[in-house]
Every structure is written in structure tokens, then in C-alpha cells.
Image: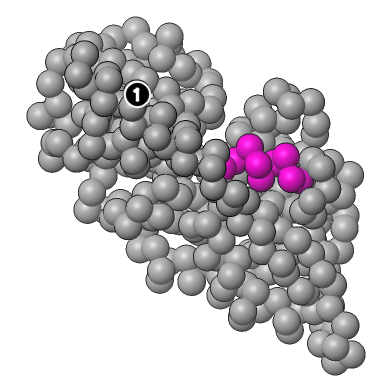
């Protein structure tokens, strides 16, 4: 009871702080969309000779997408004739709302299943470019235990409250032997748990609350973007980690359906797929963020 009170109080304070802050924060349509607009088929036009640059407003989450796009802006965009205005959002809802309302031209923070689920719930259609840019792997973290073997019965475990990332966290728990899910269920939710030998208690929370609430719970399933932002080291701190074998959960450039042929957005996507960007991701994040080949 005391733990529940502490968590609820912490969640209230986090929610109030997020509401009071006026920050403007995010792991896409199906892969076959790439055939409709193939920006890799043509080279990027260099308009730097005339000094004219195409302006584009792009929504990102601060880390890692914001840092990656900042690298592109400083090192690649000018030569490609692109003037990027980076708009940072601290939650996923504001980022997609801004896209829907035309406040931004594109965003770079979400993966395909998240985008599709969000679009269905909010009645608008988005388009994602593939191959994707990077993967923020989901890890299981704890401030109390060094191994999943040490986790007690009835442990309190938080996972993201959106459908796709909840599925990812549950799959990591299953692959670690903590639970077992119904076979072939995708996306899985807590109701699909069929074996739970430790009787863990699962609480679904917004992704942004995972790190602040970590001291109050036994385990937390957290996506890589929040891990990097919190300064944790995936390779050292994660008790279990998602495999990078399924690129469906990789992050990419997203825009409104129908705008995928916009030359500015195609140019943005091509720059983010540049080999220099892949090397930047490898060097900076050391496995906490993984570039997609």
C-alpha cells in the first residue's frame, strides 16, 4: 500500500510538471509505402551555389532523434540545400498533433506500429519512409536488483501504456523467462499472459514516466530513447534487452499521407539515411541506439 501511494504521488507530480511545462517532445505506415515515394532513386540537389535553401520544420523528441537531426543540420543539410528547423516535443501526442495540424512538415520519433495505432485512434493517416533510420531497443531496468533472478514474487513492473511498446516490453519479459504469453499474439497485452510464476504485477504508464518512477518499482520496461536521455548505459544497466532483429520497431521519418512526394521531406529522409549519420549513431550511443542498415 505504501508503494502504491508513493507511485501515485510521483505520477501526479510528473503529470503536473509535464502539463505546466510548455515544451513542445518520442520508438510510420507499412513498409510497402516506400515504393510510392522513393527518395533514394534520385540524388539530392545541391542548391548551395545560389544560396537558396528549402525550409522544412521537423518535430523530434530530444534524445536521440533530436541529437541525430542536429548532426544532420550542422553537417549535411546546408550542402544539400535544406534549411531544417528542429521543433522539440516532450511527448508523442503533441508531436503527432502538430503534424496533423500542419504546424510541422514531418516528424522523426516514431516507429511503424505506433504510428498506425495512433492514426487509427485519432482518425488521420500518416506515411512512413522505409528503410527506417534507427532502433531504440526496449530494455528491462531496475534500481533495486542486479539480476532478474533476484526479483521477488509479486514484484511491481511498469511497461509503456501504448499498444506497440507494451508488446515489446512484454516480449522482452517473456524472452527472459519472467512470463509466458499466448502464442502468435501481436500486439500482446498483459491480458495475454498465460504463465506468471512470480505473480508479477504489471502497471502500464506513459513512457515519459518510466525513468522518474523507476526508484518506486521493482522493474521497468523502457524504450531506448528514454534510457539515453536519462544517462543510463544499455549495455551495462539493462537486465534484459530487446533483439534488433525486428526492424518494424525502428524509428523513421513520418509525414501526412499525401505529402510523401514533397521534395523537402524526401531530401530530409535521404540525409538521415546517410552513412555519416549511421556512423554518428554508432559512435555516440554505443549500442543504446542502433542504425538500420
Residue lying farthest bottom?
A: 49
Could you tell whether 19 is left or right of 152 in the image? right
Magenta span of residues? 91-99
Residue 121, position as x, y percentages in the image: 70, 23
The image shows residue 137, relative to residue 213, as above or below, that is below
Q: Is residue 25 left or right of residue 120?
A: left
Q: Residues within 10 Å of mark 1 (few under 14, many from 20)?
A: some
Name the residue at 88% across, 55% down.
261
Where residue 28 appears, x then y in whole percent? 68, 41
Q: Which residue appears at 49% of the width and 50% of the height?
A: 135
Q: Is residue 56 above or below residue 200?
A: below
Q: Identify which residue is drawn at 84% across, 72% down.
A: 54
Q: Does 191 sit above or below residue 139?
A: above
Q: Position of residue 33 (x, y in %)?
A: 78, 43
Q: Nearer the viewer, residue 122 or 266?
A: 122
Q: Is residue 80 magenta?
A: no
Residue 179 appears in the rendering: no
Could one spot residue 61 in this view of the protein?
A: yes
Residue 75 against residue 183 in the figure, above or below = below
Residue 104: horizontal and vertical position, in percent?
77, 53
Q: How is the image coloured?
A: one colour
Image quadrant for the C terminus?
bottom right
Which one is in front, 35 or 242? 242
Q: Secondary structure at mark 1?
A: helix
Rendered-image quadrant of the N terminus:
top left
Q: Mark 1 — residue?
A: 8
- Magenta stretch, main secondary structure class: helix
What residue is rendered at 53% in x and 27% in y? 162
Horizontal side of 246 relative to 270 (left or right) equals left
Amino acid at each position: 500500500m505504501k508503494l502504491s501511494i508513493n507511485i501515485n504521488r510521483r505520477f501526479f507530480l510528473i503529470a503536473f510538471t509535464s502539463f505546466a511545462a510548455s515544451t513542445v517532445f518520442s520508438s510510420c505506415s507499412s513498409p510497402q509505402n516506400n515504393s510510392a515515394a522513393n527518395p533514394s532513386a534520385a540524388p539530392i540537389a545541391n542548391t548551395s551555389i545560389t544560396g537558396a535553401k528549402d525550409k522544412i520544420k521537423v518535430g523530434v523528441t530530444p534524445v536521440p532523434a533530436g541529437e541525430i537531426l542536429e548532426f544532420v543540420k550542422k553537417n549535411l543539410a546546408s550542402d544539400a540545400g535544406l534549411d531544417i528547423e528542429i521543433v522539440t516535443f516532450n511527448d508523442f501526442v503533441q508531436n503527432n498533433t502538430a503534424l496533423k495540424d500542419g504546424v510541422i512538415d514531418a516528424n522523426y520519433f516514431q516507429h511503424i506500429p505506433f504510428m498506425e495505432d495512433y492514426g487509427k485512434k485519432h482518425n488521420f493517416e500518416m506515411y512512413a519512409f522505409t528503410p527506417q533510420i534507427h532502433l531504440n531497443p526496449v530494455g528491462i531496468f531496475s534500481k533495486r536488483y542486479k539480476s532478474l533472478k533476484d526479483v521477488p514474487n509479486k514484484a511491481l513492473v511498469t511497461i509503456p501504456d501504448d499498444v506497440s511498446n507494451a508488446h515489446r516490453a512484454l516480449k522482452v519479459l517473456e524472452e527472459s523467462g519472467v512470463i509466458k504469453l499466448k502464442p502468435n499474439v501481436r500486439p500482446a497485452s498483459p491480458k495475454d499472459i498465460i504463465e506468471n510464476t512470480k505473480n508479477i504485477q504489471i502497471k502500464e504508464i506513459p513512457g515519459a514516466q518510466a525513468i522518474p518512477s523507476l526508484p518506486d518499482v521493482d522493474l521497468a520496461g523502457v524504450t531506448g530513447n528514454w534510457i539515453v536521455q536519462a544517462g543510463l548505459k544499455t549495455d551495462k544497466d539493462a537486465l534484459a534487452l530487446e533483439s534488433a532483429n525486428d526492424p518494424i520497431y525502428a524509428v523513421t521519418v513520418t509525414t501526412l499521407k499525401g505529402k510523401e512526394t514533397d521534395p523537402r521531406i524526401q531530401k530530409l529522409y535521404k540525409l538521415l539515411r546517410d552513412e555519416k549519420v549511421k556512423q554518428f549513431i554508432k559512435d555516440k550511443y554505443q549500442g543504446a541506439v542502433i542504425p538500420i542498415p
